[in-house]
Image (cartoon, grey):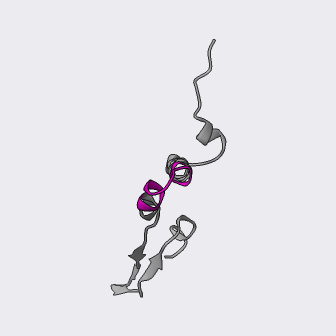
């Protein structure tokens, strides 16, 4: 009897998105100039989020790190 293969990122307790972001960051960090500085901007992001309660929109909160992504609202 064989056991099904389990992805190592799942064993480590990570989501696939967390794994993909860390892998992409590692690749960007290992590049040489000038490509490194050109692709560094792709690792940065930001967006704004707000919630609605009783038909009223709360003030928008800017999200700029993955750690803050699920905690803002």
Q: Residue at x 66, y 43 (%)?
A: 12
- In this rendering, the answer to whether 28 lies above or below 68 is above
Give the magenta range: 27-38
Frontmost residue, 56 versus 26: 26
* Whole-percent x, y for residue 8 in the image: 62, 36
Q: Residue at x 41, y 76 (%)?
A: 49
Q: Quadrant of the N terminus?
A: top right
Quadrant of the image occupied by residue 58: bottom left
- In this rendering, the answer to whether 5 lies above or below 7 is above
- In this rendering, the answer to whether 17 lies above or below 72 is above
> Would residue 70 be counted in the magenta stretch?
no
Frontmost residue, 45 versus 58: 45
Judged from this view, the residue extending furthest toward the right is 12
* Whole-percent x, y for residue 71 in the image: 55, 72
Judged from this view, the residue extending furthest toward the top is 1
Q: Residue at x 59, y 31 (%)?
A: 6
* Whole-percent x, y for residue 68 in the image: 55, 71
What is the count of numbered marks?
A: 0
- In this rendering, the answer to whether 72 lies above or below 25 is below
Judged from this view, the residue extending furthest toward the left is 55
Frontmost residue, 29 versus 46: 29
Residue 1 appears left or right of 42 = right
Quadrant of the image occupied by residue 47: bottom left
> Would residue 30 be counted in the magenta stretch?
yes
* Whole-percent x, y for residue 9 in the image: 60, 41
Judged from this view, the residue extending furthest toward the front is 33
């Amino acid at each position: 009897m064989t056991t099904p293969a389990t992805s190592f990122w799942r064993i480590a307790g990570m989501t696939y998105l967390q794994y993909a972001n860390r892998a992409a960051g590692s690749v960007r960090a290992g590049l040489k100039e000038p490509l490194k500085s050109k692709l560094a901007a792709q690792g940065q992001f930001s967006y704004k989020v707000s919630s609605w309660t009783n038909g009223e929109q709360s003030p928008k909160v800017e999200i700029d790190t993955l750690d803050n992504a699920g905690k803002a609202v």
